[in-house]
Image (cartoon, rainbow, N blue to C red):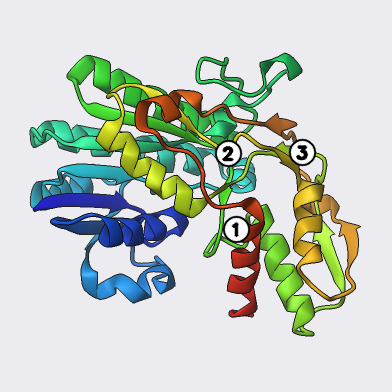
């Protein structure tokens, strides 16, 4: 019986990954980390099928005790401070949560001499300032991070590489481009727009949707395709390597918004909110996932319109 540990199992990608593993893998026990303040609604339907372990990843002793007790065969490290705007307000906390948390995990695996496979969730935000002749973005593209969050992910990425080279840890680095779908946190742009539309449809808010920068171009993948990619990374990937997880298609934020608006019968005005603008923003993130496809056979399967419809329906059921 293989033991799979998912840090951040109560979150967006973590909960979807747990569901995917339970549905598609045999002879597997799923463990997950949570904190006292973690919200449990994402995993309510699978609580009886998983093992939860309270752990503060920033505390090395807590992490060491968890690894010693569980002795996982596979680790998916998804726990993070993952919201870019928050990193501007709390850059130090973002760096500590993302880099130190992962460092503690690596050190615990070494301390207890585990031969496990570790996927780390890096980010396309690491690429940052991308020039027109550099798209679609390949893994060897220079990293020019434009936010504290992106810097924290560069640190995680390179820690994974360093611990593989220095200690032989079987680390698989995935740079995931924007991903969305049901359960996406309401602070993230696709989910924020979908929730606003659902609130307007229900009559809870005036027929105005508030937006930030609509010109940025993003590569969106359904979270359910992404978690399938994470599993394939540890099953078929090469330790130490980095892989882009992307759709290979971009939409401006404005195009994405209009797709959502067409799924509603409400007449809605679009209004810009200066408070939603960032100090600096990445103009375009378009990923090339050819390297990962050649290694594992993975490709995205869920159409973007279906992803947005499922996300909007998710919020309609909750507002």
Q: Quickly name the residue at label 1.
A: 307
Q: Residues within 10 Å of mark 1 (few under 14, many from 20)?
A: many
Tell me which label, 2 or 3, sits earlier in the chain: 3
- In the image: residue 172, left or right of residue 205: left
Q: Secondary structure at mark 2?
A: loop
Which of the pair 158/319 is nearer the observer?
319
CA distance separating discs 3 and 1: 19 Å
- Quarter of the rendering containing residue 166: top left
Q: Viewer-proximal residue, 219 or 40? A: 219
Residue found at x 42% / y 33%: 174
Q: CA distance from mark 2 to mark 3?
A: 16 Å
* Image-quadrant location for residue 64: top left
Q: Nearer the viewer, residue 56 or 130?
A: 130
- Horizontal side of residue 66 vs 162, given as left or right: left
Circle on res. 188: none
The x, y position of residue 113, in whole percent, is: 8, 32
Instruction: Label 1: state its secondary structure.
Output: helix
Identify whether 157 is placed above or below 259: above
User: Does label 2 or label 1 sit earlier along the sequence?
Assistant: 2
Q: Measuring 56% from the left and 26% from the top, which residue is drawn there?
A: 288
The answer to whether residue 227 is above or below residue 267 is above
Q: Which of pointers 3 and 1 lies earlier in the amino acid sequence?
A: 3
Q: Which mark is residue 216?
A: 3
How far apart in space, not on screen, are marks 2 and 1 (Cα)? Answer: 12 Å
Residue count near mark 3 (Cα–Cα under 10 Å), binned few <14, some 14–19, many ≥20: some
Q: Between tags 3 and 1, which lies in front?
A: 1
Q: Which residue is mark 2?
A: 247
């Amino acid at each position: 019986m293989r033991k799979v540990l998912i840090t951040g199992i109560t979150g967006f990608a973590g909960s979807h990954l747990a569901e995917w593993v339970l549905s598609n893998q045999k002879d597997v026990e799923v463990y997950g980390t949570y904190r006292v303040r973690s919200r449990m609604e994402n995993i309510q339907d699978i609580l009886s099928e998983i093992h939860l372990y309270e752990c503060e990843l920033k505390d090395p002793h807590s992490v060491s005790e968890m690894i010693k007790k569980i002795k996982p065969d596979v680790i998916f490290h998804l726990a993070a401070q993952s919201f870019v705007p928050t990193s501007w307000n709390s850059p130090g906390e973002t760096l500590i949560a993302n880099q130190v948390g992962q460092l503690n995990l690596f050190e615990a695996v070494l301390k207890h001499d585990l031969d496990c496979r570790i996927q780390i969730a890096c980010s396309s935000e690491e690429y940052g300032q991308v020039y027109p002749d550099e798209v679609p973005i390949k893994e060897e593209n220079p990293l020019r991070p434009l936010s504290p969050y992106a810097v924290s992910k560069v640190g995680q990425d390179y820690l994974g590489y360093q611990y593989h080279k220095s200690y032989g840890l079987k680390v698989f680095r995935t740079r995931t481009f924007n991903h969305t779908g049901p359960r996406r946190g309401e602070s993230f742009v696709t989910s924020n727009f979908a929730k606003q539309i659902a609130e307007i449809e229900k009559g809870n808010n005036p027929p105005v949707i508030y937006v930030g920068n609509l010109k940025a171009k993003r590569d969106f993948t359904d979270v359910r395709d992404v978690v399938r990619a994470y599993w394939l990374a540890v099953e078929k990937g090469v330790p130490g390597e980095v892989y882009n997880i992307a759709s290979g298609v971009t939409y401006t934020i404005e195009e994405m918004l209009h797709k959502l608006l067409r799924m509603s019968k409400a007449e809605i005005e679009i209004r810009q909110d200066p408070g939603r603008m960032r100090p600096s923003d990445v103009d375009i993130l378009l990923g090339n996932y050819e390297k990962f496809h050649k290694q594992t056979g993975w490709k995205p399967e869920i159409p973007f319109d279906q992803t947005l419809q499922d996300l909007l329906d998710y919020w309609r059921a909750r507002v």
